[in-house]
């Protein structure tokens, strides 16, 4: 598939670029990887705008959150399984199974006639979605040398940004124009094409499973993750943060993860080997990735709300105004990937990137209800560029610094903890925003109560007779009298600004962590080539001993 040759002189010179020449089959596989990565990310965002219609059609409003939670949980649980099994038996067949599960789940979701069915099919879809994400990154590691991998990982990372923007837009359009069923069926055409392409052109070695699966390690790892996701889902909503049930889940999750290293030391083929778990680069990239994902989720989730409620933009327009973030991520990601390929040096980017993102978030914390829109677009572009400089590079760094036979395991472990961080970040930021908004609305409404304008007082009486923040929509806000409209839009702007400011120290800590990387030389051979070389050397040693 690739013609990768490394001369002796190139190996001796760190700055030398590897001779990596992808052919047509590689580009077909790479395009398929981009497609499935996009579909996996899309299904975490596309359902949101369709939820009201789905609930109205199927009933079961009390279970609405589980439509998203079931998918997230299944993705999280599936990740380490695909990562470890891919290392043991090969990745192609597992990848095809993951795509098939995702497509079958998508098809069944579109046929659901009850909320219970939909939740079950979403879980099936997520079991495939977790494999799409991990297998795509691991296969990239199998085929592309770390020295040039950053250039190819950047577009894969951009798929998440594109999906987060297009998801709500496409979901809303399909729901309004066709039916909510197509929110799930839209996956089928692209998914089928990707499956056929992978089956036809991807060539990877396959092995028989001879090792014993580390079931206990898998249970402990996933138990901790599932409980944390449930805590993030229910905390501050269905359950108080101080409730015994929530505290019990936190305690059990902590015990599960604290006991995991003890179990992994004794396992014959651990789900997360100690050589990976205690690897310096794995620890640093995992912590940086968790902090960055937890911080980034606030902008992705709540900036559209700010644009709709403070500026009166539609969901479509507010989504489009986030496009500069994706552009920034893509441009900076490809740029840093090219520079890493040319120089072989990368320590600068995990430090500078978070600092740029922190600066952009500080700028965003100064936004008001009257801030020019071009300021907002510029700020999110800068934030995207800061994240793009280092975020996708993290996967390359951890893949480069672990044994090639553990590439999938390390990749899945890295993404596994990021997924947990997304759930926690979304929950904690959501609680903070809701508290801020309630406080700001109360303050602004109290100030309006002294008005002598009958129209304002009448509107205020109607407003206070509703469930305030939870009942507000952009359309309703736009119909309010000027004084009340200003009070509400200002409340949303003032509630969101502290959220952005809260994320600044998160990215500053991320930058500090970046200082602790060691400049490990980036291999000029793909993981497959490294494994083949190791196997050849082991065979030669056995012959010599015989």
Image (cartoon, rainbow, N blue to C red):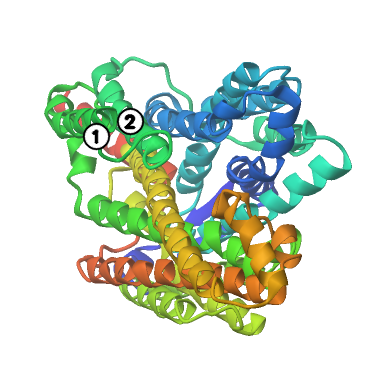
The residue at 19%/40% (across/down) is: 275
Q: Is residue 178 left or right of residue 273?
A: right
Tell me residue 25's x, y (percent): 67, 45
Query: Which residue does the numbered mark 2 point to in the structure image?
Result: 227
- Label number found at residue 250: 1
- Which residue is nearer to you in this view: 367 or 322? 367
- Label number found at residue 6: none
The residue at 61%/44% (across/down) is: 33
> Mark 2 falls on what kind of element?
helix
Q: Quadrant of residue 164?
A: bottom right
Q: Quadrant of the N terminus?
A: top right
Q: Are marks 2 and 1 in contact (CB under 8 Å)?
A: yes
Count of numbered circles in the view: 2
Whether 30 is drawn above or below 102: the answer is below
Q: CA distance from mark 2 to mark 1?
A: 7 Å
Tell me residue 180's x, y (percent): 77, 34
The residue at 69%/54% (across/down) is: 166
Tell me residue 456's x, y (percent): 67, 71
Whether 514 is drawn above or below 355: the answer is above
- Which residue is nearer to you in this view: 124 or 10? 124
Whether residue 245 is visible, yes or no, is yes
> Mark 1 falls on what kind of element?
helix
Q: Is residue 218 left or right of residue 229?
A: left
Q: Quadrant of residue 492?
A: bottom right
Whether 98 is drawn above or below 120: the answer is below
Tell me residue 213's x, y (percent): 31, 17
Give neighbour class at mark 1: few <14, some 14-19, many 20+ (Cα, 10 Å). some
- Which residue is nearer to you in this view: 342 or 156? 156
Mark 2 vs mark 1: which is more N-terminal? 2
Q: Residue furthest right?
A: 177
Q: Quadrant of the C terminus?
A: top left
Give neighbour class at mark 2: few <14, some 14-19, many 20+ (Cα, 10 Å). many
């Amino acid at each position: 598939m690739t013609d990768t040759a490394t001369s002796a002189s190139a190996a001796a010179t760190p700055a030398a670029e590897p001779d990596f020449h992808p052919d047509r089959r590689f580009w077909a596989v790479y395009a398929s990887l981009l497609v499935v990565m996009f579909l996996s990310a899309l299904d975490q965002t596309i359902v949101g705008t369709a939820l009201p219609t789905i609930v109205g059609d199927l009933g079961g409003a009390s279970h609405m959150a589980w439509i998203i939670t079931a998918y997230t949980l299944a993705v999280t649980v599936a990740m380490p399984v695909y990562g470890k099994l891919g290392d043991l038996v090969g990745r192609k067949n597992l990848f095809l199974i993951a795509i098939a599960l995702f497509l079958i789940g998508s098809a069944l979701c579109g046929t659901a006639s009850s909320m219970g069915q939909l939740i079950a099919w979403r879980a099936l879809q997520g079991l495939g979605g977790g494999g799409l994400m991990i297998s795509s990154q691991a296969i990239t590691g199998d085929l592309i040398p770390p020295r040039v991998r950053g250039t190819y990982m950047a577009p894969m990372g951009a798929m998440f940004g594109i999906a987060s923007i297009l998801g709500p837009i496409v979901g809303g359009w399909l729901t309004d124009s066709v039916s909510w069923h197509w929110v799930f069926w839209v996956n089928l055409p692209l998914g089928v094409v990707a499956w056929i392409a992978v089956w036809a052109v991807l060539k990877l070695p396959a092995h028989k499973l001879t090792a014993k699966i580390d079931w206990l390690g898998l249970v402990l790892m996933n138990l901790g993750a599932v409980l944390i996701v449930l805590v993030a889902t229910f905390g501050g909503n269905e359950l108080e943060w101080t409730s015994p049930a929530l505290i019990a889940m936190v305690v059990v999750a902590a015990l599960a993860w604290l006991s995991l290293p003890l179990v992994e030391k004794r396992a014959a083929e651990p789900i997360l080997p100690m050589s990976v778990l205690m690897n310096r680069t794995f620890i640093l990239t995992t912590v940086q990735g968790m902090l960055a994902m937890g911080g980034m989720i606030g902008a992705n989730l709540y900036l559209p709300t700010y644009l709709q409620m403070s500026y009166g933009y539609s969901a479509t327009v507010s989504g489009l105004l986030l496009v500069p973030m994706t552009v920034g991520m893509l441009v900076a990601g490809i740029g840093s990937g090219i520079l890493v390929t040319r120089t072989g040096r990368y320590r600068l980017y995990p430090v500078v990137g978070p600092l740029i993102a922190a600066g952009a978030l500080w700028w965003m914390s100064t936004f008001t209800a009257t801030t020019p829109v071009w300021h907002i677009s510029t700020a999110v572009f800068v934030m995207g560029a800061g994240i793009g400089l280092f975020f996708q590079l993290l996967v390359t760094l951890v893949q480069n610094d672990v044994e090639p036979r553990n590439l999938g395991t390390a990749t899945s472990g890295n993404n596994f903890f990021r997924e947990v961080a997304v759930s926690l970040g979304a929950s904690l930021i959501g609680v903070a925003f809701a508290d801020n908004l309630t406080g700001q609305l109360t303050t602004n409404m109290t100030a309006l109560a002294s008005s002598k304008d009958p129209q304002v007082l009448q509107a205020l009486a109607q407003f206070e007779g509703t469930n305030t923040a939870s009942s507000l929509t952009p359309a309703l806000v736009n119909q309010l009298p000027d004084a009340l409209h200003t009070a509400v839009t200002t409340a949303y702007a003032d509630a969101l600004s502290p959220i952005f400011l809260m994320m600044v120290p998160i990215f500053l800590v991320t930058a500090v962590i970046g200082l602790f990387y060691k400049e490990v030389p980036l291999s000029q051979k793909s993981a497959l080539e490294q494994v083949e070389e190791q196997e050849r050397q082991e065979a030669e040693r056995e012959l010599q001993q015989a």
